Amino acid sequence: MSVLKRLGYLLGLPLLLIAIWYVLTIDSDSFFVVDPVTLAQTFVDTWVGERFWNDVAPSLVRLAVGLFFAIGLGIGLGLLIGSFRWLRSMTEPVLEFLRAIPPPVLVPILMILVGINDQMKVLVIISGSIWPVLLNTVEGVRSVDDVLLDTGRVYRITGWLRITRLVLPAASPQIMAGIRQALSIGLILMVISEMFASSSGLGFTIVQFQRAFAVPEMWSGVAVLGLIGLALAFIFQFVERRVLRWYHGLREVDHAG
Amino acid sequence: MARRGGRASRLTQLPSGVLGLAGVLAFLLVWEAIPRLGLADPEYLPPASEVLQIFFRNLGLTSFWEAVGHTMLGWALGLAIASTAAVVLGLVIGSSSFLRQATHSTIEFLRPIPSVALIPLAVLLFGVSLRSTLLLVVYASFWQVLIQMLYGVADVDTVADNTARSYGLGRLARIRYVVWPTAMPYLMTGLRLGAAVALILAVTSELVIGVPGLGHEIALAQSGGATTAMYALVLATGLIGVAINMGMRLVERRVLAWHPSVRGEVHA
């Protein structure tokens, strides 16, 4: 496919949609709708500069810290639980229950237990996004190929080496699928924890705009959240390609066969 | 499992149901013990027995079931709207290679936008009403179903499709007899994921916006200092979540009873 054609596919529909949006809002005086030009201008005026450092950056740091711990703890505990069959059967119902709790209801609980501060927000992110990682790791460790495990045993590959070279790589496709879910839940919780109880941060600022009926600013905040979501998806895809390169290669060979 | 010696192997011989029950009991026991031993303030973390007591008392209250009804209504309506739209769009986009390529970038751009970003918009447009919940629920679960649907339609076996063509099956008949069965397992996965996300968003809109339902009750209990009642409500939302997950898995198994993945499971 030529470069031009690919570019057409990539940008065609978005440009068309923006054009329609522009035409429809050209002489609309609806209060809730903004035209693309105003939105772009407000976006730059509102978010570039001081507010980025005061409201966006702290939110992002909390998100990063929360996700870091959620992924680390999720994989660690998942390895432990997944390695013992009795531990797995014992913890399964409780884990299923904890995972099924809609994470946002943890916000009021942690507000009471921890108070309203940064730790609370990080804990909310951890306690919501740990479950997909944990449960997927358990499932991934459980379904490691028996032949691989036996071969490892024959070669006396044990302990740390066995985990890092055998179990973790074998479980990594499942783990990555869990991390993908964790990222989007983490982002949702970052916003909610700030909307519910905060005096700073992205979620708080957007609600503030909405309460002040500053509609273009509110829309620009929605756009910021969209861009963060997009950036996370890109980072994830990049990392996943690297981590699972062997796996995608294997699948391609399988499909070709 | 004989190769794992010692206590572990004796434990493995217990049926997993018994072990699971033991796990639940241990969880409740630890929860009971932490506030009783003074490791946490009972004001903030009431013991399990008190929470369970309120939880069971709730089961006899009309107001509790009304709140559950509100939450479930938003969940079910939102999921139904989102999946209908996603199935139709998925079939249309998926069956044309041009549309698939042309919409790819737009879908990948819109999908990661967290649906909570729409909360302020929902408040401005609809205020405290079911429509706010629907906006969030539909947006969140739509993408889950659509993506799976697109994967499913793309997975159609070319040989099967060509066979159907040479037997003179028309476009609609091919969708019915070739595309639909292929996409079915994917659709069920999408519905299962979408159902879980829909519950999260339904509760969120109640919690943050104040739409009536369990989430709103939780917010009220929290701001009113009724900690134990709040824990009981959270317990209820968790159980609803478990029920939804189990229900969707059951439906999946029923609907896909003919599919090799499920048939294999039954035999194994």
Image (spheres, grey):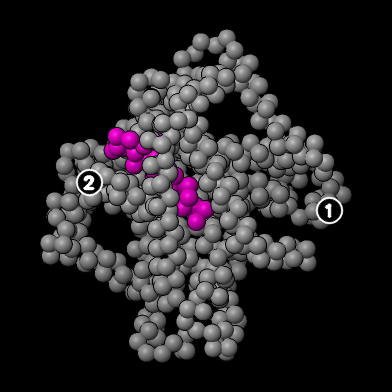
Magenta highlight: main SS: helix
Establish if B44 lies above or below B143.
Answer: below
Q: Is residue A202 left or right of residue A36?
A: left
Residue drawn at (46%, 68%), measured in percent from left and top? A138
Amino acid type, label 2: Gly
Label 1: state its secondary structure: helix
Q: Position of residue A238 (x, y in %)?
A: 60, 53
The amino acid pointed to by label 1 is Thr
Q: Is residue A125 left or right of residue B147?
A: left
Whether A195 is among the magenta residues is: yes
State whether residue A60 is above or below residue A181: above
Picture disc at residue B28: none
At x 55%, y 24%, the residue is A40
Judging by the rendered image, the residue that carries numbered circle 1 is B163
Badge 1: chain ID: B
Q: CA distance from mark 2 to mark 1?
A: 65 Å
Q: Residue at x 40, y 86 (%)?
A: B9
Residue annotated with mark 2: A115
Q: Looking at the rendering, in which quadrant would you find the N terminus of chain A?
A: top right
Chain bearing tag 2 is A
Give the camera-side residue of B184 and B215: B215
Q: Is any atom of residue A218 visible in this view?
A: yes
Quadrant in which the C terminus of chain A is drawn:
bottom right
State left or right for residue A15 relative to residue A211. Answer: right
Nearer to us in this view, A181 or A232: A232
Could you tell me residue A186's position as x and y percent?
A: 43, 48
- Residue at figure coordinates x 16%, y 44% from the top left: B226
Report if the CB atoms under discs 2 and 1 are less than 8 Å apart: no
The picture places residue A104, in percent across and down from the top left corner, at 35, 45
**Bounds of the magenta segment:** A179-202
For disc 1, the neighbor class at 10 Å (few under 14, some 14 to 19, many from 20) is few
Q: Quadrant of residue B40?
A: bottom left
